[in-house]
Image (spheres, grey):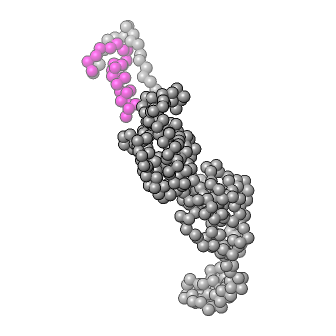
Amino acid sequence: MSTEQQDDRTSGSPAHSFGNTLAWNWSREMPRYLKGPFLTALYACRALASASGRMCFKDGKAIRIQDMAKAFGCREQDARRYLDAAIRAGVILVDGERRRGIATVYVLNALIRHPDWKAAEDYLKATARRPKEEETPAKGSSHSGTNSSDGGSVHSGTNQFGPQRHELGSPDAEEVRATEARPGSDHSGTNGSVHRGTNNPGSNHELPHEMADVVTQPQPVAREVLESDRSSAEDGDGDEPPFGRCEVCRVPLTRPGRNRCAGHLEGMPGQRRAVGRRRPVQAPLMTVVPPVADSPAEASSEPFHWEPENPLDPERVCACGRTFRSRDGKTCQDCKHAAHQEARTA
């Protein structure tokens, strides 16, 4: 609120009466528990209110809870607690309905003669945070104060965010020791997640010495046990194959009536046994061409030559009825051309 909006606070107004009553009467009547941040919040409400006692601007817009918290010098959660306690005491009224997400207009009540300070005190005690001296600092912490939102602090105090230490329960020593190497923030307080590890990028995370008795080591198999199992299998202590074993390599046989495997089986008399690796036989590089069926001789693909008529040759009549001139021909050139085309397409 600017200074221009505070000029209308004259003597005799509800805001002025509220301030006088608060300074001369209420501050002396209220319990000692309320003479602290709660009393400071009431003085701030008197300063934020207009001459009519409404905590709003000239245009009627309500003052936000964020601005009130800054004037009270506390968090928004505590500012809401102080306003609720003042409403229970009767020194502050609500103009309209309180809805979430919408700023509420509060009104100073200077007409009340005997505020209910006991109700305000009981409410503040019921909603108060745990005192700092009751917190038990963890091992290796540098202080036990209130944690801020800045990361990287090394402490074990009460954090503003997340559940408190007394709400998480007390895990046994083994669980705490087992979760100590989990990467996380570099403090052992509560910040919404339960961890107590170290978060040092670029460094090797080494396990502490006290975790040596927690990690379960794999049980090595002795060489004597493996050799005894192998010797028992070779001596026939286990199940014997149905067709016996090879007398050379002790491999189970797959056919009856033999005492050696295929690798140590002797060849038949007169059969030459292949020694070493055989050379691959290359296939002949020939391609089988299928036989071609006999096809009739193709007709001549020469083009047809038209012979010019000689006007001096005698005129003749073709079998097709056409007249043409030729000295020794019996058919016209049209019939010759048709016969040539039929021969090519046959």
| Residue 78 visible in the current orientation | no
Question: Horizontal placement of 116 versus 200: left or right?
Answer: left
Q: Tell me: residue 287, above or below residue 268.
A: above
Say whether residue 174 is magenta. Answer: no
288 or 179, which is in the foreground? 179
Question: Horizontal placement of 305 versus 171: left or right?
Answer: left
Q: Residue furthest left?
A: 321
Percent x, y for residue 246?
64, 86
Q: Tell me: residue 297, above or below residue 32.
A: above
Residue at horizontal 68 percent and vertical 85 percent from the top: 225
157 or 339, which is in the foreground? 157
Residue at horizontal 58 percent and vertical 69 percent from the top: 170
User: Where, by quadrant of the figure, is residue 248 drawn?
Assistant: bottom right
User: Where, by quadrant of the figure, is residue 164 drawn?
Assistant: bottom right
Percent x, y for residue 126?
48, 58
Percent x, y for residue 212?
70, 73
Image: magenta residue range: 320-346
Question: Horizontal placement of 286 versus 120: left or right?
Answer: right
Residue at horizontal 65 percent and vertical 69 percent from the top: 177
Query: Quadrant location of the C terminus?
Result: top left
User: Where, by quadrant of the figure, is residue 32 drawn?
Assistant: bottom right
289 or 301, which is in the foreground? 289
Residue at horizontal 55 percent and vertical 84 percent from the top: 255
Say whether residue 338 is magenta. Answer: yes
| Residue 204 visible in the current orientation | yes
Q: Residue furthest top?
A: 312
Q: How many marks?
A: 0
Q: Tell me: residue 243, above or below residue 282.
A: below
Percent x, y for residue 173?
63, 73
Question: Horizontal placement of 62 versus 152: left or right?
Answer: left
